[in-house]
Amino acid sequence: MIIMEKHTDFEPTSKRFDFIDRYQKAYRNTGISYQFGRVNGKKAIQFFYEGELVATRFKTQKYRDTSFDIAAYGGQDMNSAQNQREECLQTIVKRLFEKYGCKSEFEPNLGNFTPDVIVERDNFKAYIELKAFHKYNICGDPEIAQTMKYFEMASRLVEEGEGGFKPQDKVPRAILLTTGSLLHKNQSCFTQDNKKDYKYVKKFYKKRIAPRRYVDKMDKFTSKMMNIHAHKKFKRNCKIGLREMNVLFPEDIQQNHLPQLFFDTSQYEVLIVNYKMLYELLKRENLTTEAHYLKLIREAKLEKLVLNRDILDL
């Protein structure tokens, strides 16, 4: 049982320790600390964030590791918290497309690639790439290239009559949905004369690598690591060779046309939907709970998710 109250009868039995994520030791300034003690004679622990008491808890599970395991007290490590964001977004997208009569499958193994979600209805099929990012994280050309790669590989499967496709079949569309900060259409290398230009992307992200003194939050650390490695991710996704595609950015889309646009595959081959459009669509479809959790994915601090895995328990 997890106790969230701030007990006044907590008796400390240790000094206060700084929490260091066991899988992200490169980032030490988590702002999280903990202290062991007792409540009414029972072993307990108190968690603090930036010096303020957040919760008092009892252990929820046993563990054999000699190092401190926050999961035993209702928390989780940074990687698990980030994965939880994506799992929550998968559930949101599944419920949205169920409204439109679609079947969904999470992370199907399609051989050389694994989209986050496949949605199907009648003769419509789409591979959906989800980027459940915090608002600090840029969703840009590396992620767009990854989504374009799905359309490229699907096109080859159809052309070669492989993977259960016939040459006359319609190529599944590719859709990118993100809660992060999507770059503007005019900033994308795919709308420039130097399309798929590795140097352009490397320069773009190099400017956005935050100095160490500004990296004072887990999400900012994650953002910095993403920006450092973005050009490598872009290069990897473009490596197979991407054909010319009809890519629709949010700037090309009218909000009230979005539901119909999903299924009007004559309008696009790759569709990009930002947080604001997805949030408004969920509210329009009366998926208010899902809209609330979408906002949490974007705005809830990673530190809060590390301390309490129930926040995104949709």
Image: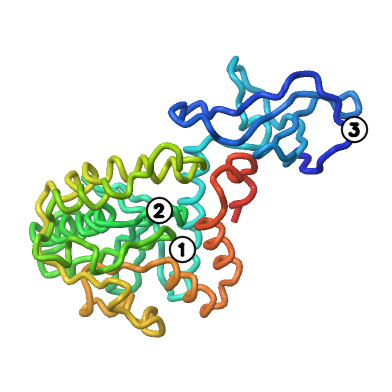
Q: Element under label 1?
A: helix
- Badge 3 crowding class, 10 Å Cα cut-off, few under 14, some 14 to 19, many 20 or more, is few
Label 3 vs 1, first from the N-terminus: 3
The reply, left or right, for residue 223 in relation to residue 306 is: left
Q: Residue drawn 51% across and 26% down?
A: 22
Q: Amino acid at mark 1?
A: Lys
Q: Element under label 3?
A: loop
- Give the spatial CA distance, label 1 vs label 2: 9 Å
**Which mark, by number, is residue 94?**
1
Q: Amino acid at mark 2?
A: Phe
Q: Which residue is mark 3?
A: 9
Q: Quadrant of the C terminus?
A: bottom right
Q: Amino acid at mark 3?
A: Asp
Q: Position of residue 106 (x, y in %)?
A: 40, 53
- Image: 150 above or below 49: below
The reply to whether discs 1 and 2 touch (Cβ–Cβ < 8 Å) is: yes
The reply, left or right, for residue 73 in relation to residue 103 is: right
Q: Which of the 4 image quadrants contains residue 262? A: bottom left
Q: Quadrant of the N terminus?
A: top right
Q: Position of residue 188 (x, y in %)?
A: 22, 62
Disc 3 versus disc 1: nearer the observer: 3
